[in-house]
Image: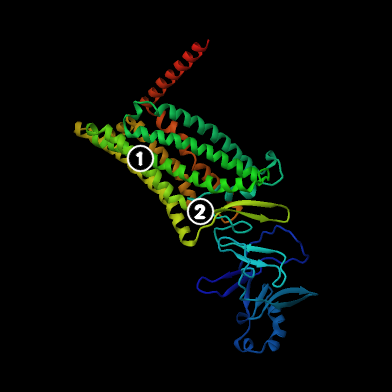
Amino acid sequence: MKDYKSDSRVGVYYLAHTQSTYQQTANITVMINQFDRCQNISELFNESFVQRHLLRRIKHYHVSCQKNLNLSCFYDDIHLCLCYDLQKQRLANCFEFNHNMSCNCLGQSSCEGGGQCFQDDDICPTRSVCICSPCFYGTRCQFSVNGFGLSLDGILGYHIQPHINLLNQPSIVLFSLSVVIVSIVVGVINGILSLITFQNKQVCEVGCGFYLIGSSITTLLTVVIFGLKFWILVLAQMTVISNRVFLQIQCVSFDFLLRVCLNMDQWLNACIAVERSITVLKGLNFNNKKSKTNAKIVIIILSISIVSTNIYDLFHRHLIDEENEDDKRTWCIATYPSRLQTYNSFINTFHFFAPFIINIVSAVILIVQKTRKKANVQNNANYKKLLKAQAREHKNLFIAPVVLVILALPRLIISYVSRCMKSADDSWLFLIGYFISFIPPMLTFVVFVLPSKFYKEQLRQTLIAYRARIQRHFQSNQ
């Protein structure tokens, strides 16, 4: 295994594993320590010895293995030598080694993400292997997953076993299946109830109602796309679905649409929090008509902004094939140039943090402003007691931003504790982070309707009206 110092291209070698008997395929786990590092001969011999002609010094290489029992390997300008035991003697086995290899498989590298490509033979190679850069993994280093840019393909894909029944898949796949089924049921019920509530005319008399209708629609879209994305991934990796055109279409569109819907929902929730803060600040001077007009304009601007800031993703997604000894897999990956990768990280972080901060600030403004107005009326009242009283009295106004902030915290913590996935073994943590990102859209009804007497009353009236329509319809058909 070869590493590079950060300030140069000088090789630093480690002997990770040796096989006494050749095995074509093996799973090997080792912990690299300082004794596995291959030393340069300048560290083992004095300067005058190093300056000797190769033929005069190479015959003494055995001495370094015999003097240092912990030495596993060393190298000079031409050779790489391994220390081994033979008939109670420590000897050096040296072979020519190219220290300046390009690691690009003679210009035919199939490695993604800046991975290094190695072949089993320089002249007539039969197979190659990719050594991935940090935060990239997969046979071709095709996956890169971080906390703010999660993709189900990279998190779950390698755990799905081809040609194996769904119920016999690994536990992480079955867990994901259970979560997805529950999420779809809860999300659909939540979206339908929210739409029924917020399409009421009284709710839409202010801009907040339009934001809530938009949030309900994005909830239903998110749940449908999320469910389709999961099932297509599972069936494709189980080789049930293999139509390349279909896989290409879903590859390009589904992750993009999921990203847009999630971002849109976060921003709509932030708009609701801002609208409620403005309502408290302006009081009787709040203009309902202006609020409705502004809400329509804001929704249009948000839609255009979110789509335009994420549109690049459509043009950098493609399918790649991965051929192993036992099977062939098709993956959907996103490949960004270095500058676009920086922009991708920034825009994902921005669409997460900006609504997150707006919700926090709005929750604080709601409580503080309500308390100040009450304190102005009651001059002798204790401010802390008033603060608690206002928090209890108007909990329906600030409970939504507070809950949304709390739901965002686990994903925020995961993103900074484990910045990126380095292998498929890290899947559980990032899978939980991925599912957490879908919780807020699925709780629109719980967060906004259940704490509010007004919204619950509007829901009750709308359901009564629907029931009356259904009864009249059946009576007219009899």
Could you tell me which residue is drawn at 42 percent across and 49 percent down? Answer: 308
* Residue type, mark 2 in image: Phe
* Residue type, mark 1 in image: Cys
Q: Using a 10 Å C-alpha cutoff, classify the residue at mark 1 as few (fewer than 14 neighbours), some (14 to 19) or many (20 or more).
A: many
Task: Name the one closer to the observer, 458 or 68.
Answer: 458
Horizontal placement of 308 versus 376: left or right?
A: right
Q: Quadrant of residue 74?
A: bottom right
The residue carrying mark 1 is: 271
Q: Which quadrant is home to the N terminus?
A: bottom right
Q: Are marks 2 and 1 in contact (CB under 8 Å)?
A: no
Q: Quadrant of residue 182?
A: top right
Horizontal placement of 199 versus 124: left or right?
A: left
Q: Position of residue 322 (x, y in %)?
A: 66, 55
> From the viewer's perspective, is residue 359 above or below residue 310?
above
Q: Position of residue 369 (x, y in %)?
A: 26, 37
Could you tell me which residue is drawn at 60 percent across and 72 percent down? Answer: 102
> From the viewer's perspective, is residue 197 above or below residue 109?
above
Could you tell me which residue is drawn at 58 percent across and 60 percent down? Answer: 112
| Label at residue 315 | 2
Q: Position of residue 389 (x, y in %)?
A: 30, 31
Indicate the secondary structure of the residue bearing disc 2. Answer: helix
| Label at residue 425 | none
Label 2 and label 1: CA atoms lie apart by 30 Å
Q: Is residue 383 visible?
A: no
Task: Name the one closer to the observer, 333 or 135.
Answer: 333
Task: Name the one closer to the observer, 74 or 310.
Answer: 310
Query: Disc 2 vs disc 1: which is toward the camera?
Result: 2
> From the viewer's perspective, is residue 68 above or below residue 131?
below
Point out the residue furthest to the right here: 87
Q: Using a 10 Å C-alpha cutoff, classify the residue at mark 2 as few (fewer than 14 neighbours), some (14 to 19) or many (20 or more).
A: few
